[in-house]
Image: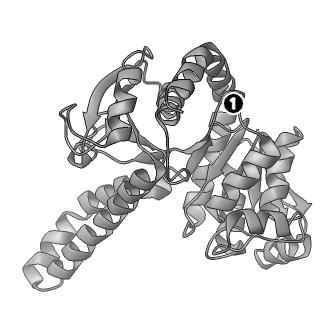
Amino acid sequence: MRIALDVNGGDYGLEPNIDGALKAAAELPHDIILVGREEQIKKALSSRGYDTLPERISIVNATQEIAMDGEAVEEYRNNPDASMSVAAGLVHDGKADAFVSAGNSGAMMVAATFRMKRIKGVIRPAIAALLPTCSTPSLLLDAGANMDCKPVNLLQFAVMGSIYMQTLLKIEKPTVGIFSIGEEECKGNALVHETMPALKKLGLNFIGPVEGRDLPPGKVNVIVADGFVGNIALKLYEGTAKAVFSMLKEKIVEHLFYKISALMLKKVFVFLKDKMSADIYGGAPLLGIDGIAMVCHGSANSRAIFNALRVSADLAASGMVEKVRARMEELQPVFESLKQETK
């Protein structure tokens, strides 16, 4: 596969992107296209001992970049030669099979939508984030792209999320739940109540509403929600993991006996930290885009970038986009009917 990487994306600039790309080129059988200011990229490579381009590494020059804290549409329009937009254009033009960025996630949604386009029939693409659980990871979508949704959006999220879990994690019939404030169908807001009857008719393995405490045990494989609720859940998940490890560390250093015990349990702590880290998944794909676009956390390190490149290549090779396209075409009459009912 050929994977385009926006080297300007993220809070830490070139460094983690370059290091993640070099690791990917050395360990994976894929071509990595570094998209950004060519002079800066070559300087960064030279500082790492590469006076010529390493094998399977190429550069596409892009003279602008999108600010992490900028307004998404404005940044996209004002920076037509931004590395993020150029990387998305490479996928659209068939010069790359996927692109990865740790940049402004809103601008990435705009760039991917305008440059790569949506799969026919998809109303709104969604950010699909894998959550670590006590069992198989669960997929939460939307994780922050669409603040206000209609029932038809959640139906499409459920379909795309199921295909993603079938394709990437090889789960034959992924269970699907709708995020709510209780397991009883009488609870929830208007969006939950309006969406549930249609979800039951889609032929998915829908088990009903799930609440926040059902996420860590991994009760369902796919959780659908609007982007506002989904992003709150995702950030709470991340913050809780950091807080737990912080409290453990604070307690361990209080007493010599605790320090000795911690040394004996070091492998356990390393396992837990690794399992709870978002780095092992790399990023979250934009499902519904006509191609593979992987959104990484702004604080992504080189390990996260490496894994994002790895997973995006796996998705590009899996034919997931084609599977989503076929299913969306098949279900189009259902979606059109629901759009009319909820106008």
Residue 297, quarter of the rendered image: bottom right
Q: In the displayed structure, does residue 236 sit left or right of residue 116?
A: left
Of residues 332 and 35, the one drawn nearer to the viewer in this rendering: 332
Q: In the displayed structure, does residue 94 sit left or right of residue 168?
A: right
Q: Residue 167: x and y, percent?
A: 54, 26
Of residues 114 and 256, the one drawn nearer to the viewer in this rendering: 114
Q: Residue 293: x and y, percent?
A: 68, 46
Residue 7 appearing in the image: no
Residue 75, quarter of the rendered image: bottom right
Q: Residue 64: x and y, percent?
A: 85, 71
Residue 20 appearing in the image: yes
Q: Would you call the spot at circle 1 few (<14 residues within 10 Å), some (14-19), or many (20 or more)? A: few
As displayed, is residue 73 above or below residue 37? above
At a point 75% along the width and 74% down the height, the residue shown is: 48
As displayed, is residue 57 above or below residue 287? below
At a point 89% along the width and 41% down the height, the residue shown is: 93
Q: Amino acid at mark 1?
A: Ala
Image quarter where the C terminus lies is top right
Secondary structure beneath disc 1? helix
Image quarter where the N terminus lies is top right
At a point 41% along the width and 15% down the height, the residue shown is: 201
Q: Which residue lies under the disc numbered 1? A: 317
Tell me, what colour scheme is on the image?
one colour
Q: How many marks?
A: 1
Q: Residue 4: x and y, percent?
A: 78, 51
